[in-house]
Image (cartoon, rainbow, N blue to C red):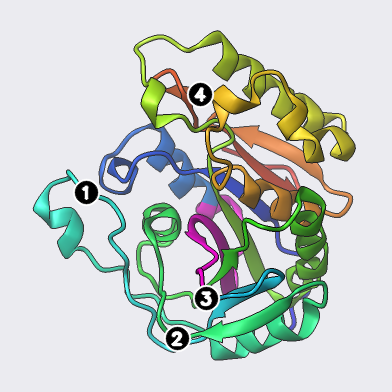
Amino acid sequence: MTNDQKMPVLFIGHGSPENAFESNIFSQTWAKLADTLPVPKAILSISAHWTASEHWNRGTTAVTAMTEPRTIHDFYGFPEFYDAYTYEAPGSPELAARVMEIVKSVTVEEDSEWGLDHGTWCVLKNMYPDADIPVIQLSLDESLSPEEHFEIGKELAALRSEGVLILGSGNVVHNLSALSPETHPWAASFDKFVKRSLTETDTDALLRYEKHPDFELALPTDEHFLPLLYVVGAAENDEPHFFNELMFAGSISMRCVAYWDHELKL
């Protein structure tokens, strides 16, 4: 794969599966984003919803390598038509092989079982509703250190010059047990810390996110934060462009960031 223009890297705060089907400020902005960016040849997604399986060893991650990834409905309590929906984007064994080639810091194995979970397809349904762009997913090994996640992102950066859009999907604040009509002070504090770290290119502070005094409330588990580390690793020298800078239900940050060397018009 070759491309004359370096593709952006995105972190999308995906929030609820409702955003896949409702027309709201989040889904509308994702659609506008796709209209602004060059059309990718393929998409590599790192989603909060695919974490390392217990049968993998530490330092081993996986990449989907099937030609027809299934749509995974990894949620409950929503209308039946949510479970009936399929996002029928093709896979890309070629791109999966390329990921296995360029990522050297961990072992990457082919996966033929996972597919596209809602962290991926809920966003892409709005960005690329025709589902005509190949999509693969890379799993998260939660046993890795923040520095190791970041290093994988740095290795993936080579794909940007090959027409590949790198997408991290999660939420920088994610506490489902603390939903509230009003934004919690600790949620706002941690979200501001993340923005400041990204704006000031303070990668050391970002990688030490667990030291922040509001970390345990902002992220009772941190799988929704980890995709951001891949995005920052792949960002190279590009400036961050922020959008959807809102808090949903008091404890879910919908903050999104695009790293791109062009102006982002939304």
Residue 197 vs residue 216, the one in the foreground: 216
For the residues carrying marks 2 and 4, which lies nearer the camera in this image? 2
- Lateral position of residue 153 relative to residue 219, left or right: right
Residue position for label 3: 55
Q: Residues within 10 Å of mark 1 (few under 14, many from 20)?
A: few
Residue 8 appears in which quarter of the rendering?
Answer: bottom right
- Amino acid type at mark 2: Ser
Image disc number at residue 223 = none
- The correct choice, above or below, for 176 with respect to 4 in the image is above
Query: Disc 1 versus disc 2: distance between alpha carbons?
Result: 24 Å
Badge 4 or badge 3: first in the primary sequence: 3
Quadrant of the rendering where the N terminus is positioned: bottom right
Quick check: can you spot residue 148? yes
Q: Position of residue 95 (x, y in %)?
A: 62, 83
Badge 3 or badge 1: first in the primary sequence: 3
Residue 50 is covered by the magenta coloring: yes
Q: Give me the residue at 68% from left, 74% from top.
A: 163
Identify the magenta region. 34-54
Looking at the image, do the residues carrying marks 2 and 3 touch, with CB atoms under 8 Å apart? Answer: no
Image disc number at residue 246 = 4
Looking at the image, do the residues carrying marks 2 and 4 touch, with CB atoms under 8 Å apart? Answer: no
